[in-house]
Image (cartoon, rainbow, N blue to C red):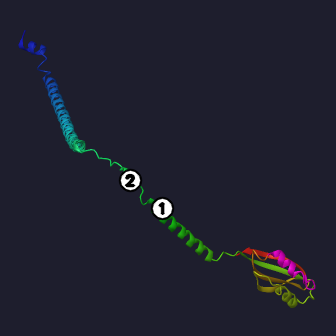
Amino acid sequence: MSALDFLAKEKIWFDKPRYDEAEKRFYERMSSTSSTSQSTGVRQALEIISRINSLEHENQSLHKVVEDLRAALSKLESRVAVLEKSPAPVTPQKSNDDDLDLFGSDEDEEADRIKEQRLKEYAERKAKKPALIAKSSILLDVKPWDDETDMAKLEECVRSVEADGLLWGTSKLVPVGYGIKKLQIACVVEDDKVGTDLLEEEITKFEEYVQSVDVAAFNKI
């Protein structure tokens, strides 16, 4: 076999660029994988360090809480020890002499006397205070017989009615129609002494001038 025939059958030399390219890709992939693994490792290490720091902080906080509880427990134990050592309070015994009320009768009499005196003074003040008198304001409508009735004389007759607890007030003439006017007059009465029935009865006695009497308004004062 000649050298030319050998080279014709040997393909490795002709495919070398392809093998070089494959080798390059292999090493690039290995490098990328190594870099990724290194980055992942660093990130995991940082996470572990962060968790360790967090656990250390929590441990410090728990340690402080435990110390505070120990201090509080120590104070409580000290107080309990002091209380256990303190003697029990002695309840004073009531002497038989306390049962003897040597001056009780005199004190009771003085208290009763003061009470009676105050009741007497209260009754006197109440008796001097004037009692509240119930009064009412009444407005009366006094109607004449016709338009020829002397209204001045009619009012004079009405005001002539006198009674204990009766006080006449203002008056005016109010037209009712057909030239007829009625007398509208106000008065104040003490309820216990004068009523509307009495007023109507007394006023209607002047039958020459008065036809009727009506209560237009009635108000408690």
What is the secondary structure assignment of the residue under circle 1? helix
Q: Indicate the quadrant where residue 201 lies.
A: bottom right
* Above-or-below relation of 14 to 191: above
**Residue at 57% of width from left, 71% of height from top?**
120
Amino acid at dot 2: Asp
* Residue 124 relative to residue 209: left or right: left
Q: Indicate the quadrant where residue 41 lies.
A: top left
State whether residue 177 appears in this view: no
Q: Indicate the quadrant where residue 139 lies.
A: bottom right
Nearest to the observer: residue 20 or residue 26: 26
Within 10 Å of the Cα at label 2, are there few (<14), some (14-19), or many (20+) other Cα atoms?
few
| Residue marked by disc 1 | 108
- In primary-sequence order, the first of circles 1 and 2 is 2
Amino acid at dot 1: Asp
**Range of residues picked out in magenta:** 195-210
* Above-or-below relation of 159 to 107: below
**Residue 190 appears at what percent x and percent y?**
74, 77
| Residue marked by disc 2 | 98
What is the secondary structure assignment of the residue under circle 2? helix
Q: Are marks 1 and 2 in contact (CB under 8 Å)?
A: no
Would residue 206 be counted in the magenta stretch?
yes
**Residue 27 appears at what percent x and percent y?**
14, 28
Seen as rendered, the residue at the extreme left is 3
Q: Which mark is residue 84?
A: none
Would residue 179 be counted in the magenta stretch?
no
